[in-house]
């Protein structure tokens, strides 16, 4: 089965900065956040939820997300979770920073998403540290960790146990937005798409 990706659109000026780089080789369905229904997701198998969405709305309608995952689909949330609408996820915690190197981020568990991506390229942008991620999530032993801060706190993880589907949580900007920077972070978009393709195939085989 091919990827059928939808992005929940915050529909306001703050959300513009979170838009993903346009991809000519992949069509992404745009769903205005307040039109989110189970019907809107009928032809979708990957739902990307960016920062700046209305999390109060998602909390009030979390059953839609739960049903989507129950059907062996994938939800990707990139941002700061402050309402418990995402199954199995803790709330976002800010990282305590005492030195700029505390922002350093390190790939874990031979992650295919961040394979070959250098810590320096993720941590520092135009000489400033901290743009990639500034906080973390608590995880359980069953959740697969892909990125950690120097402190050990988790920046990115995958959860295949909380629901019938797969949940990807990343405490930063949209993972499909990394492209054209002439750094190793340019690998993230392509590798993340490959990860989603493989993950969807695994879910479909399990049906």
Image (cartoon, helix red, strand yellow):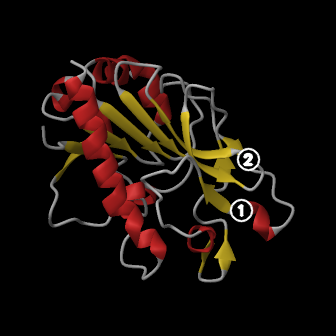
Q: Position of residue 112 (x, y in %)?
A: 42, 52
Residue 141 versus residue 70 in the image, above or below: below
**Front position in the image: 73 or 29:** 73
SS label for mark 1: helix
Identified at 46% across, 60% down, the residue is 115
What mark, if any, has residue 103 been given in the picture? 1
**Front position in the image: 131 or 110:** 110
Residue that mark 2 sits on: 152
Q: Local crowd at mark 2 within 10 Å, few (<14), some, or many (≥20)?
A: few
What mark, if any, has residue 187 been given in the picture? none
Q: Position of residue 142 (x, y in %)?
A: 56, 25
Looking at marks 1 and 2 on the same chain, the residue that comes earlier in the sequence is marked by: 1
How far is the residue under mark 1 from the one under mark 2? 11 Å
Are circles 1 and 2 on residues that touch, CB within 8 Å?
no
Q: Can residue 63 be seen in this snapshot?
A: yes
Q: Position of residue 178 (x, y in %)?
A: 40, 67
Q: Quadrant of the N terminus?
A: top left
Q: Quadrant of the C terminus?
A: top left
**Front position in the image: 92 or 185:** 185
Identified at 49% across, 57% down, the residue is 173
| Number of numbered tags placed on the structure image | 2
Q: Position of residue 181 (x, y in %)?
A: 43, 79
Q: Can residue 20 be seen in this snapshot?
A: no
> Residue 167: which quarter of the image?
top left
Identified at 65% across, 82% down, the residue is 127
Identified at 48% across, 48% down, the residue is 51
**Front position in the image: 161 or 5:** 161
């Amino acid at each position: 089965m091919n990827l059928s990706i939808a992005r929940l659109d915050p529909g306001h000026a703050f959300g513009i900065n979170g838009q993903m780089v346009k991809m000519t080789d992949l069509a992404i369905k745009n769903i205005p956040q307040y039109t989110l229904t189970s019907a809107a997701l009928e032809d979708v198998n990957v739902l990307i939820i960016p920062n700046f969405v209305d999390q109060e709305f998602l909390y009030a309608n979390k059953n839609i997300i739960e049903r989507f995952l129950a059907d062996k689909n994938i939800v990707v949330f990139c941002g700061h979770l402050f309402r418990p609408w995402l199954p199995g996820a803790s709330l976002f915690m800010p990282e305590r920073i005492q030195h700029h190197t505390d922002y350093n981020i390190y790939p874990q568990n031979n992650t295919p998403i961040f394979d070959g991506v250098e810590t320096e390229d993720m941590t520092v942008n135009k000489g400033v540290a901290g743009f990639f991620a500034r906080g973390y999530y608590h995880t359980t032993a069953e959740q697969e960790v892909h990125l950690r801060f120097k402190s050990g706190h988790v920046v990115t993880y995958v959860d295949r146990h909380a629901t019938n589907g797969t949940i990807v949580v990343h405490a930063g900007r949209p993972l499909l937005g990394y492209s054209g920077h002439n750094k190793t972070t340019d690998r993230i978009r392509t590798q993340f798409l490959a990860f989603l393709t493989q993950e969807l195939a695994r879910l479909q085989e399990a049906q």
